[in-house]
Structures are given as structure tokens and as C-alpha cells.
Image (cartoon, rainbow, N blue to C red):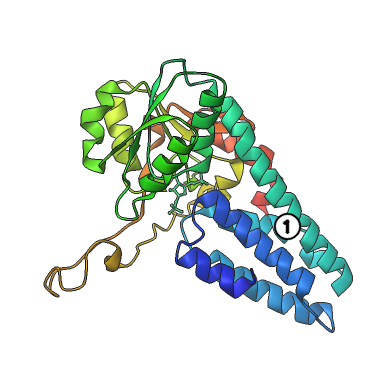
Amino acid sequence: MNVDDTVEAIKSMEIRGAGRIARAGAEAIGGMAASGKWDGIGAMRKDVLSAKEKIIGSRPTAVSLLNGVQFTLKGFDECKDVGEAKALLIGNSEAFVRASNEAVSIIGKIGSRRIKDGAVIMTHCNSSAALECIKEAHRSGKRIKVYATESRPWRQGIITVNELAKEGIDVTLIIDSAVRSVMKRVDIVMVGADTITSNGAVINKIGTSQLALAANESHVPFVVCGETYKISPQTLFGDTVTIEERDTGEIVRDGEIPGTVKVFNPVFDSTPARYIDGIVTEVGIVSPGSVYEIMIRQFGEQIFN
Ligand code: RI2
């Protein structure tokens, strides 16, 4: 898919999920390098940097998209000619996609160990990282039951229940407002992440923080599953995470309400670190308080430049 088609597909949520959009962004840059023709490195640099801005602007909340594109562009500034730059971008893009898919598989293996035989799990939206933990627990023979929230307005929960049912997992769909009532039946909550801030807060699908509140009230462990490229170094220096607001048409049909009525449709919320019992990453299960250490280890000292 070329850059413009990728941007459109991410904006429209044809491609969705923080991990998937990161891989799509990296592949778009790699594809551009493979098929593009430039007379000199200057012209190539101009096109690639313009493509970068378009891609990272397509969904502002998931830092995974920015990190995936930046990983792909690592070393690009030092390239001397088009041939060297093409090889670098193609190689970095393929390396990111491989590492990203591998990270989800590792998270599944690590996170599944936090799921006991006979456990009842609640999940929200449709997170490939969280679902990999649940599927891996099932594959290892654990008898589990899952409550999946509908996750209005986009109803990604429908994708989740289809995915889990296909694996033969016992799954029940609930509406978002049933979360607190159902929580008393739940042994562990496992959700994904769009962005993990340097102080261990987690930005995820709207409603996640309500699951965390209800879990905390019922003393149910609340576990986030997220690859380290969802950590945002920018938040270390006080940057805030933009919470994307989407079209009102996702919530109401034309003519359903008077034009004077406003509709507020934020699609993510922030869960404070104090409500998070653990973050399952591909480098292990970490407490929200140790995200800073992981950030330095994974991103290196260059984040201070
Ligand atoms: P994975 C999704 O956002 C959900 O918020 C999900 O929890 C998060 O991305 C992470 O998904 P959207 O794209 O990377 O549905 O774990 O708005 O698949």
C-alpha cells in the first residue's frame, strides 16, 4: 500500500490497533523507498520526510505509529546517496515489522502465565497483545472464560468475540455499562495500550479507565499488555498525549438529535499508574513505576538529545 493509501486506511480505521498501524506506517516508508525514483538524496529526503509527517499525523494518540516510523528512519540523515538510503529504509522497515510481530508473540507467552487455569478474564476493545495472552493461555490447555466489552462507539468488541470464538474460547459479550456489575465474577482484567507514558499511565480505548476503577474497587488485578514501542519518550519532557476525537457520526445517526446538541467523541482515555498492577511487555512484566528504566534501555540515551 503506498503512503497516501496507508494514511487514508489508518485515518478511516480500516487499519486499526496500535501495533498494526505502527507496522503499516513502517511498511509504507519501506515501500516508498523500494518503488521510489530520485535523482539525488536531497529530493529523496524531502519526499520521505513529507511522507513521515503525513503518516504520523493520521492518528495522533498511538505513539506506536511515531515510534515505528522513527525506527524505520534511523540512520537516514547520515545516508550519502539514494542507493544507500533505499537499502537502509527497506531494511529498517522489515526489521521493525518482524520485531513488532515477535514482541506480540512474546507478550502472549509471558502474559498467559498470569492467567490461572479456570480464570475469568475481562478485556476491552480489540488488542492483539491482550488477546495473544488469552489465546496462549487457551492453547496451553487452561480452561478460561472471557468477558469482552462491546467498546462503543466503534464496537471493536465484536471483532474480539469473533476472534476468540474462532479459537474455541468461551467468550461473553457485554455492553460497556455492565463492566462494574460483571467485575465481581472476574479474576483478571487484560487490556492493550496505545501509549504508555514515562510515569506509567496508560492511554487506551475510551472506557479503559472505568474498567481499571471497577477492578480496583473489586480487588481484581488490572494488567496492561503493550510492546515497548508504545512507550512515549516525549512524555518524559512534559509532552501530553493528544486524545483523538472522532466524528459524531460514529455516535448518532443523521437527524437523530437537534443540530443544537453537541456530541463529544474522545476515543481514548488515560488510566493512572496507581490502578495498574502490571504492564506485560516483550522484555518482561514491569510495574508502571519502572517504565522509565525500560524506556532508557529500549530507546537509549539518544532520547536526551
Ligand atoms: P494492539 C486500539 O485502538 C485499542 O485501544 C487497543 O487496546 C490498542 O489499539 C492496542 O491494540 P484502535 O486502533 O496494538 O482500535 O494491542 O482505536 O492491537
Q: Is 141 above or below relative to 27?
A: above
**Which residue position holds label 1?**
93
Quarter containing the C terminus: bottom right
Q: Image point 37% across, 45% down: which residue? A: 157
**Left or right of residue 196: residue 85:** right
Q: Is residue 215 left or right of residue 290?
A: left
Give the class, few, some or many, for how many residues have Cα within 10 Å of label 1's Cα (few <14, many ≥20): many
The image quarter containing residue 75 is: bottom right
Q: Position of residue 249 (x, y in %)?
A: 28, 68
Q: Amino acid at mark 1?
A: Ser
Tell me where residue 54 appears, x and y as whole percent: 57, 72
Taking depth in this image into account, of 140 and 104 the one nearest to the observer is: 140
In the image, the residue with mark 1 has its CB under 8 Å from the nearest atom of ligand 1? no
**Residue located at (56% from left, 25% from top):** 139
- Percent position of residue 161, x then y: 39, 40
Q: Position of residue 32 (x, y in %)?
A: 72, 71
